[in-house]
Structures are given as structure tokens and as C-alpha cells.
Image (cartoon, helix red, strand yellow):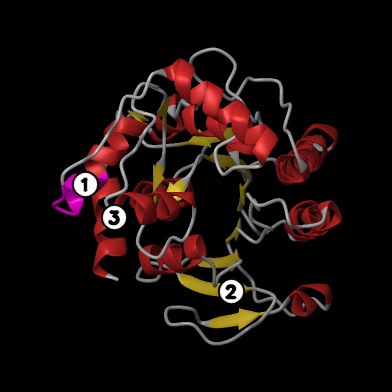
């Protein structure tokens, strides 16, 4: 049975990957704290990595990282210590232990761009992240790519995948989707219905499917975006949320000009709606998953975007 080492095992993605992979793999965890976890043979600490006390594994999935702080309360150096330096450390371990055949690093679309140039984000975009989260992720990517380029013989026959998922959601997730749910579930009308922006999401079920595929198949080393197949407008997202809660959607199409005036007023009076927040709420962020599907030889993801969102919203509602 294949053996895996998953860093950040206790997080949202790590917990879901354990559920998806535990029946077909022996899983070891690596985390800051090392409590026992169902489905994990043993959880180790980063000290165990430093002291070479890690069991032999066939693949490493590197999830551990400092999440994007939308409230900007985290010091910049924390992002680089965690997202960049820990990635360097675990990738160096992979490099030195040549029996390990696969390395999957969870980066982020925010390592590529804060705003999508054109209509859709592809892997060949020149990275220009904004803020320490994206900058620290792209520094980690650059380190890995530089190693691959400077010493290709070391990685011959070994898959090194840099995965850039867009917003990941699923049961147990407490991110931005949960914040929007909190507003909509109270029956508060959505006033930005006149803005028809579109964005893509990543359901945890599709992500788990892709990770299984990457572990089972040989793929070319490099960067791969990760997303569901379909992009949704915020209005469609709210309609999906309300349908999952069996509520009526209240979407107000307040004229854009009036909303923009209110946002500029918010800049001056420090109100919740300002021009920065309006831009974020109404921007397009559509991500292509064509490359990862071609690498895995599939035509579509197994879970439709709407179905995945319904599952997530029902989990919020039930809890």
C-alpha cells in the first residue's frame, strides 16, 4: 500500500484528504502539533523532519501554510517564515530522499495574480502577486522551479506538482463563503445585483479527486491551476445558497452609479462598503482548469460547481 506524508494534516484540506485517501494509503501527518488523528498512522512534528525521524514514504503532499488573512492583521514576515521557508525545508527533504516519487505543493491562484488579466487565468501568466500571502507563495514556487531547472537529473522520474487552487470550499470550511452565507441566511438583501461578475471555486470533492489522480498517474512536473469547471456570478451563487436553504433570494439591482458613490463615501467615513471592498465583491476571477484535466486524461470534474456549493451550504445550514 502506498505511503504518504501530508503536512498541515489538521487543517480543513488536510482533514478532508485524509478521509478521501485513508482507505488506499498509509498516511503519516506532519504538523506543528502532533495529536492522533483518525485515519493517520502517526502524526509527526517538524522536529522529526529536522532529526530525520520520518518513515519512508512514496509521496509528500505539502499543505502547511499561513492562510490568507483578509483582515490584514498578520505581520508580513510570518507569511514568509511559514509559506516560503517551510516549503523550502520540506522540498529539500524530498530532494535528498530520492526514493520519494511525488511532491505536491499547495500554492494558490493568489501567487499568480490578485486580479485576472483578460477573461480567464491560465498557468502561463507572469506572476504579479499583491501582498505578503501571494508573494510568499510565489517565492516558494520560484524556489521549487529553480531547483527543477538547475538540477533536472535529481528529479528525473519524479513528479513535482505545484497546485494553484482558487477558493476551496466544503463541509467544515470557515472561509469567505461562510461569511457570505452568514449575511444571506439572515435574509439581508444583496444590493449588488447590478454587477454581473463571475468567479470559479474549488469544491473539496473535486480537489480530492484530483489529488487521487495525481498520486495514481505520472504527470509532467510544473504548475497546475485547480478549480471547478463552471464559473458562477455572485447573483447565481446567492441563488444557489438560498435554494440549498429553501429560502427566497433577495437580490437588489441598485444602480451601479449609486453604489459607487456610496463606496466613495465609505472611503471618507470609514464605512463597511468602500471602493476597495466593492472592487473585491464585484471583480471577475475565472480560473482555467484545462491543463490539470488534460494531465489526468479527463474531460470534466466529477462534481458540478453548483452541486458542490449546495453540499457546502447545507453543511453550514445543518451546523
Say if 257 sits above or below 141 in the image: above
Mark 3 nearby-residue class (10 Å; few <14, some 14–19, many ≥20): some
Give the quadrant of residue 45.
bottom right
Residue 145 in magenta stretch: no
User: In front here: 184 or 41?
Assistant: 184
Query: What residue span does the magenta drawing correspond to?
Result: 241-247
Residue 304 seen in this snapshot: no
Give the quadrant of residue 194.
top left
**How far apart in space, not on screen, are marks 3 and 2 (Cα)?**
36 Å
Residue 36, given in percent of the width and then of the height, sits at 53, 87
Quadrant of the frame with the N terminus: bottom left
Give the quadrant of residue 123.
top right
In the figure, is residue 47 to the left or right of 7? Answer: right
Q: Which mark is residue 29?
A: 2
User: In front here: 155 or 274?
Assistant: 274
Say if 271 sits above or below 22 in the image: above
User: In front here: 198 or 162?
Assistant: 198
Helix, strand or loop for disc 2: strand
Q: Residue furthest top?
A: 118
Q: Point out the tag, 1 or 3, that comes first from the N-terminus.
A: 3
Residue bearing the label numbered 3: 185
Residue 273 seen in this snapshot: yes
Q: Which mark is residue 101?
A: none
**How far apart in space, not on screen, are marks 1 and 3 (Cα)?**
8 Å
Residue appearing at x 40%, y 48% in the figure: 180
**How far apart in space, not on screen, are marks 2 and 1 (Cα)?**
37 Å
Q: Point out the tag, 3 or 2, that comes first from the N-terminus.
A: 2
Residue appearing at x 85%, y 34% in the figure: 150
Residue 179, given in percent of the width and then of the height, sits at 44, 53
Residue bearing the label numbered 1: 242
Amino acid at each position: 500500500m502506498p505511503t504518504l506524508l501530508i503536512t498541515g494534516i489538521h487543517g480543513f484540506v488536510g482533514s478532508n484528504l485524509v478521509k478521501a485517501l485513508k482507505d488506499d494509503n498509509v498516511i503519516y501527518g506532519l504538523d506543528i502539533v502532533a495529536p492522533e488523528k483518525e485515519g493517520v498512522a502517526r502524526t509527526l512534528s517538524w522536529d522529526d523532519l529536522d532529526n530525520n525521524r520520518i518513515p519512508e514514504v512514496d509521496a509528500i503532499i505539502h499543505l502547511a501554510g499561513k492562510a490568507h488573512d483578509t483582515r490584514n492583521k498578520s505581520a508580513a514576515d510570518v507569511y514568509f517564515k511559514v509559506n516560503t521557508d517551510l516549503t523550502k525545508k520540506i522540498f529539500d527533504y524530498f530532494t535528498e530522499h530520492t526514493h520519494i516519487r511525488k511532491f505536491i505543493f499547495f500554492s494558490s491562484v493568489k501567487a499568480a495574480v490578485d486580479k485576472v488579466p483578460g477573461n480567464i487565468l491560465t498557468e502561463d501568466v507572469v506572476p504579479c502577486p499583491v501582498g505578503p500571502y501571494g508573494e510568499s507563495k510565489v517565492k516558494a514556487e520560484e524556489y521549487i522551479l529553480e531547483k527543477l531547472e538547475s538540477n533536472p537529473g535529481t528529479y528525473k522520474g519524479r513528479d513535482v506538482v505545484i497546485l494553484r487552487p482558487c477558493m476551496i470550499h466544503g463541509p467544515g470550511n470557515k472561509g469567505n463563503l461562510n461569511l457570505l452565507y452568514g449575511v444571506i441566511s439572515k435574509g439581508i438583501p444583496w444590493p449588488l445585483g447590478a454587477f454581473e461578475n463571475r468567479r470559479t471555486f474549488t469544491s473539496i470533492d473535486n480537489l480530492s479527486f484530483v489529488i487521487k489522480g495525481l498520486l495514481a498517474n505520472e504527470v509532467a512536473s510544473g504548475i497546475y491551476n485547480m478549480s471547478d469547471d463552471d464559473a458562477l456570478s455572485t447573483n447565481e451563487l446567492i441563488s444557489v445558497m438560498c435554494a440549498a436553504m429553501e429560502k427566497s433570494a433577495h437580490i437588489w439591482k441598485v444602480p451601479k452609479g449609486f453604489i459607487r458613490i456610496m463606496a466613495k463615501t465609505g472611503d471618507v467615513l470609514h464605512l463597511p462598503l468602500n471602493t476597495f471592498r466593492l472592487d473585491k465583491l464585484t471583480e471577475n476571477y475565472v480560473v482555467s482548469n484545462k491543463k490539470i484535466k488534460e494531465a489526468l486524461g479527463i474531460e470534466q470534474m466529477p462534481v458540478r460547481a453548483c452541486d458542490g456549493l449546495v453540499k457546502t451550504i447545507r453543511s453550514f445550514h445543518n451546523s
